[in-house]
Each structure stands twice: as C-alpha cells, then as structure tokens.
Image (cartoon, rainbow, N blue to C red):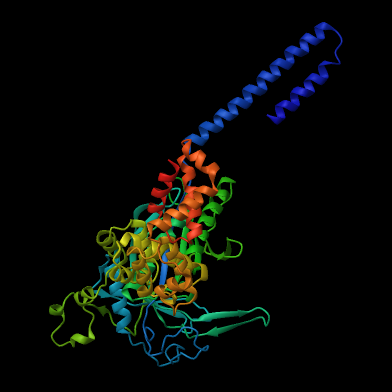
Amino acid sequence: MAASSSGYSNMLFRLKKYGSKTQRLYHIDTFNCMIRRIWTSESKNQIQSKVKTKSLPQMVGVVGLEVHAQIHSKSKLFSGSHVRFLAPPNSLVSHFDASLPGTLPVLNRRCVEAAVMTGLALNCTINRKSLFDRKHYFYADMPAGYQITQQRMPIAVNGILVYSHFEGRRRNQVLSKSVRIKQIQIEQDSGKSLHDDEQNQTLIDLNRAGVGLVELVMEPDLCCGDEAAAAIRELQLILQALGTCQANMAEGQLRVDANVSVHRPGDPLGVRTEVKNINSVRHLAKAIDYEIQRQMELLQSGGRVLNETRAFDSKSGNTVPMRDKEGLQDYRFMPEPNLPPLFVYESEASVPADTEHDQVVVIDRLRAQLPELPSMRRERLVETYGILLEHSFTLVNEDGLMNYFESVVRMTKTEPRKVIGWVIKELMGNLNLQGLKVSQSPISPHALSELINLVESGHISSSAAKQVFQEMWKVPEKTAGQIVKELDLWMINDREELWRICQGVVDRHPEEVQIIRGGNKKVLNKLMGEVQRETKGRTDPVQVRAILEDMTS
C-alpha cells in the first residue's frame, strides 16, 4: 500500500500542470486506469499469497534423542579401576584404561545387570545373545583408538518410554505420550579433554575412560523441546528408581545428543543436525526449540540445512557449529576379538548345568528385583490418597518428597489432601527459595505432622500455623507447641471474648457497616481481616463471620 499511495500522490501532482480540459480528462482517465491496474495487481498478489500459504502445510520439527547414561557401579566396564566423581586427574586409571600393550578386558557383571534392568523397565526385548564391537575413531582422550560398544547386536531392542507432557494455559492438562526405544547398548566412556586457552594446550584426564555406559537410541518420535525434556525427565526418574544410573546431569552422568530436522508433513524428513552433549533438561528444551526455529527460517529464506554437529551455548541460547558431517565417517566397525558373545538367561532352569548360577545374568531374577517405577508410584498416590494427578507428579519428580509426604500422612489425623498443601506450598516453597533439597529440610516429617495436628485439633488457626511454620524453619530445634506458647498463638475459643473483639471492629468501621447493610456483603471480608489482624490470626474464620453477620444484619 505504501508504494501505491506514493504513486497516487505523484499522479495528482502532475495533473495540476495541465491547462486544457481535454488534456486533464485524458490524464484523469489514464490515472484511473493505472489505479485500477495497481489495485488489481496488488489484490491478485495478495490472493495468490493467501492461496499459497493455505496450500502449503506448516513445517514441523522432528527430534530423535541419543542418551548416554553412566552405569552406577563401583568399578569400570572392563577394568577394576574405581569410579568416583572429582577424583584427582588420572588417579583412577588402570593399565587397560590407558591401553597398554598386553592388557585384556574383563566384563563387569554389574554393568550387564544394569543394562538388562533398564531394558526391562522400558519394555524392551532382551537379546539372549549380544555381541561387542570396536568403533574406531582417533581422539586424544581415547587411548586405544577405538571404543568397545555393541553395534551389530545390542543387549536390548524395541522398547517404549511412556512420559507425560503438560499442556494448556496453566500447564495443568496432562497428556500421556510415548517414544520408541530403538536399542540399548553397553559401551565404554571416553576420557576428558581439558582445553587451556591461556597456555594454548589440551590436557587429558583418563579417570572417565572405560567407565560403563548404557546408550539409549530413541526413534524420531518427538516434535519439540518440551516433549524431549519431559521424556528425558521421566527417563531420569526411571534410572534413579532402578539404581542403574544416578542420572545427575550436572556431573555428566546423563548426557543427551539431539538429532533435529524439520519438514512439511507428508514430505520426506529433512537434513538433520546433531546437537551434542547437552547436560541439563532445561538446556535440552532450549537447544531443540532454537534449532527447529533456525532451520525453518533458513529454509524459508532459500537456504540449505547442513548435516553437521552443533553445540548449545547456554549463555546466548543459540546452537553453534562444531564440525561438518557431510562426508560419511567410516568408524570401521569390527567384532571385538578379546570378548566372546554375551549370553543372558531367561530363568534359573535355562542356565547350563555346568555353569555357576551366581556368575550368570538371569532375566527372571532381575525382573523380580524391579522396584515401583515412577508411573506406578503416581497411580498409587492418586488412588490411595485421593490427590490430584498433577500433585502426584510433584511428589514423584522431587527426590525424597514422596517419602516425606507419606511419612507426614501416617503421623497426622488430617486427610491427605490437606497435607499435600503443606508439603507442596509451604515446604517446597521454602526449599526452592533457598535452593535446598528435601533431605536438607530443617523441618522433619514428624515436626510438620505435629503442627498439622495442632490445626486439626482446633488449638491454632491455619493462619497462625503458617507463622509457626516459618519460626520452625528458622529455629528447627523448637517444637510447634513451644513456638505457639511463646508467641501466644493459641486459638481464642471464648465466644464472649470473640464477640467483644468483633464489636470493637464494627464500632471502628461505621461506613463499612452501612455498605454491608445496603447489600454489599463482600465488604464483610474487610472486617474479618481486621479481626484476624487484631487477634494475630488466633480466631476461627467461620465463627468470626457468623458473629459479624449478626452484628451487621
């Protein structure tokens, strides 16, 4: 419209210069034709643009994840070296970890059991026979020049991870979704390269080299950062419940690679990029959403998405290129010659007679050891205590909170739905404010249950109880009863005293009383607030309301 308006004003300017009527009429007709042509052209372009927009479906993101979970084990996958976070550099390195000539791998049974338990929890098919392979690549922190992994025949295949995704304006609509697990494989971790830019050198720490990992390869069933974050959070909880991985992403115990592409529904999948080594759930969501948006904008502007490895910069919130993957990398996979096939057995009866039963991995034995998984915990909490589904997620997702809640419920006389308010609002509110874990709470389940019982028995009001809670938080050695006595917060149950206090409030607020008598009952809340302030919250709101209604009627 800006262009046509400009043309219109220029035409008017030129019309003023013509003197004769004939000339003016000719140029007015010419001007009208041009206006019609401009309008028709613009309208046609707008219509074509709208038709084009409607005919082409919007591009969508496609996300597949690869997760490396560090197996919770005292020793490494193929050596007796200990596994410990923040140990002095190169202090936990055996001859095999350093790849000295003549050293051979000895498989850690604990790592195999952890992989099988993880597969069972994710509804995988456990392969009775699996194989180890060498994957060759030459990094300074990989002394052997290859990684021992399971490329051809992994320990588990064809699983499914069911997770819950929150949607809606208040994010209180719980949708159950799933992502397929292509395979789970056992493999070694590499060492760690520490880059010193000031000295222009790279230092190698081999403490992590040879630590056992389970790699979970997911199918590209996810579409955005929120879904990926929800899936990884559920996986974290499952691994922690199993005890197979502590899944502390800050310590590198769970690392995620995200394969991201975009396409229009119905078209083939687009060229993917891989965002490597994301070490927090929040960063995972941000990295994926940024990469989807980047690829869409690139394609819409006529560009081309490169098949490359990228990293997420948490400061800028962007992904940045690391290395090109356009050329096919040849890892020269080959069978691991120093390790025989790995056999696991379905039941005790299927173990060969000449084999020691305590030296083999039996699936039934591990299945019997499976704990209550997060999804089962949520179902039980909702059914047993009648709490909301979203509250069950909070209890299960926060380490130690479910046990805390159940302990309080056992020791109180109140219904669980009231306890959940104290645990989620008061307890978690204070913990989050100070960045503490549930295990670091200064208020024990027993102390909180004592406070709740005082409210339920009518000795203190709920508002007074909140004051007591904050004092207990500051001075944990004092009991709820002691604080109530010191602050004189016992409930005022004497009706004559309550009547006297309410009468005083009514006498001091004649204008509000007139408004209430005029029909505006909402103003009664103001008088109730005044009574609460005067009594420091030591009154029963129901009793106070009844007295005030009598006085203002």
Task: Identify whether 442 is placed above or below 99.
Answer: above
**Label tally:** 0
Task: Identify whether 344 is placed above or below 122.
Answer: below
Position of 352 with respect to 548 (left or right) is left
Residue at 28% from the left image edge and 59% from the top image edge: 382
- Residue 341 pos. (x, y %): 27, 79
Task: Compare residues 548 and 481 and report the one nearer the observer.
Answer: 548
Which image quadrant: the C terminus?
A: top left
- Residue 97 pos. (x, y %): 44, 87
Task: Identify whether 317 is placed above or below 333.
Answer: above
Residue 447 sits in quarter:
bottom left
Which image quadrant: the N terminus?
A: top right
Residue at 58% from the left image edge and 61% from the top image edge: 317
Task: Compare residues 425 and 304 and report the one nearer the observer.
Answer: 425
- Residue 224 pos. (x, y %): 46, 54
- Residue 292 pos. (x, y %): 51, 54
**Residue 221 seen in the figure:** no
Position of 306 with respect to 96 (left or right) is right
Task: Identify whether 234 is placed above or below 400.
Answer: above
Task: Compare residues 394 and 151 and report the one nearer the observer.
Answer: 394
**Residue 551 seen in the figure:** yes
Residue at 28% from the left image edge and 73% from the top image edge: 117
Residue at 42% from the left image edge and 53% from the top image edge: 499
Task: Compare residues 473 and 210 and report the one nearer the observer.
Answer: 473
